[in-house]
Amino acid sequence: MHNNYYFLRHLSAELANRIIGFTLVSCFSQNKDELVIELNDGKISFFIKTSLQPEFQCISFPRSYNRAKKNSVDLFNPLVMNKVISIRQFSNERSFALLLENENALVFKMHSARANIVWFAAERVQEIFRNNFHADLELRMNELDRSIDWSYECFLQNQSNLQSVYLTFGKSVWSFLREHNFDELDPEKRWRLLQETRTRLEKPDYHLLEKEGAFVFSLLPSGDTVKTFTDPMEAINEFFIRRVSTAAFQKEKLHLLAHVQGKLKQGVSFLEKTNQKLIALKGDNHYQQWADLIMANLNTISPGRENIEVENFYDDQRPVLIKLRKELSPQKNAEAYYRKSKNRAIEINIIKESIARKEKEMQQLGDWHLSLQMADDLSSIKRISDILLKQSPDKQVKQSKPYHEFEFKGFNIWVGKNAIANDTLTLKYSFKEDLWLHAKDVAGSHVLIKFQAGKPFPKEVIERAAGLAAYYSKRKNESLCPVAVTPKKFVRKRKGDPAGAVVVEREEVILVEPRE
């Protein structure tokens, strides 16, 4: 509910109290899903951070923000040094705007996975933050307001279509109404509950709830309330911090649980198959019997025989056919079967030891699994992860690679997954002979073309890797992108630089089309 119309209306009103008269002094991005705006009144700075990740979109207001020296890019440059004149909340719409000098406006369109930030000049779109949402280029500010008929007559006429009529409520409000048996009430009581809920939304408190292990933001009390606020900015900041940290905790917990569950499943399968093999080996002692039968019938076995049939005194004198190696004497054939019988006994002991080790390992994995299920913070998860890394039978929990892998004309091309992965790729997975690429002057992935002895880097391979560097950068939607190319030996990292930031001492720049 943190992007619901009713909350954004209260939030934009609070923004108006705090930043009207402030000057926009910088607007930048350090990753493709986050925009940071700094405003200043000559005395203090005010930061607006908008995170627009596909799975989580949220505005927050950090008290300070340290911009990285590298891998950050300025955006909406013509807005810099424009003052905030007012804040406009669009009617019945999950969007509000910072109205700036010179007929400029920065619209925050918080439409869940399609959320975006749009710069308008004279009510026409000039630039959008998330360039892949081309429909936002056609937006018109004067068309963003929406109307709702709140009359009782409209309510009665639309009993089967209320969610479409009252579009500002959203899923959270309708869930709240259903918790209060809205669907079972007669129209008069429905109307009364609807109006009471709307009144609450007009003058709400802000609640942090915990539902199924996740933090939820709500203007309506429901379930397990963790904390309640009266200030919308304080509430959204607390929610953002808890939601992000919880998401990281849940992701790591699920990763480790999946690893341990996979090991437990493998262990169960191993024990089933190994126990079946052990039973079969224990029940099959024919090598020992064959050797005894050969020794008991030495006088009747002529040299050069390939098999003999004798009465088996271990099986009620039933005849048994025994294979022989014709180049060996009867005594030697018996010795060979005795050795096989001895080896089978050794094999049985080895299998028993293996089963005992696996059962002990399974008990330990079960203990870890229980501990992970009970873990409720990152420190607990980290402690268990460290134990798994040291004591897991395969010595380490498999870690995902920090890069995407591509192959082109026999050459391996590796593309860093994020800023931290970029550092790992460049500093730990590269050699000085590799070719290093990066989109020029914007945030993006480090790219390596792996060196092959005796093979120069073909032009088409370099262009292919450059296309990937362009695609995995903030320039991915441009028609042409400049890409820096240099041997890895000319790339270094200075102490204290943020994740992904490096110094390139020599480079060539080529223009390519961004291509995945």
Image: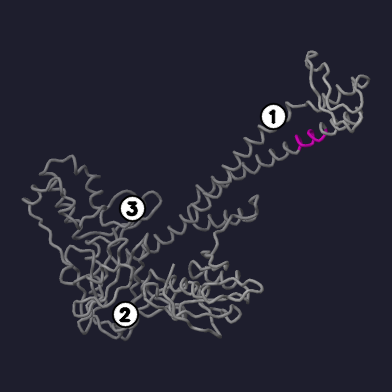
Residue identified by numbered label 2: 76
Q: Is residue 347 magenta?
A: yes
Seen in the picture, residue 33 relative to 375 is either above or below; the reply is: below
Question: In the rendered image, which quarter contains the N terminus?
Answer: bottom left
Question: Which residue occupies the extreme top position in the image?
Answer: 316
Q: Which residues are magenta?
A: 342-349
Query: Measured from the top left, where is residue 508 in percent x and y?
Result: 51, 84
Going by the numbered disc 1, the residue's amino acid type is Ile
Badge 3 vs badge 1, beta-carbon distance below 8 Å: no
Q: Which mark is residue 225?
A: 3
Q: Is residue 62 visible?
A: yes
Residue nearest the observer in this picture, 297 or 302: 302
Describe the element under mark 2 as helix, strand or loop.
loop
Q: CA distance from mark 3 to mark 1?
A: 57 Å
Q: Residue at x 26, y 52 (%)?
A: 171
Crowding near the residue tagged with mark 1, few <14, some 14–19, many ≥20 C-alpha atoms within 10 Å: few
Q: Return the x and y of residue 99 as percentages of the image width and height.
A: 22, 77
Write down the quadrant of residue 516 in the picture.
bottom left
* Amino acid at dot 3: Thr
- The residue sitting at 23% across, 77% down in the picture is 120
Q: Which mark is residue 279?
A: 1
Q: Secondary structure at mark 3?
A: strand
In the rendered view, tell whether residue 302 sits above or below residue 56: above
Question: Dot 1: what SS?
Answer: helix
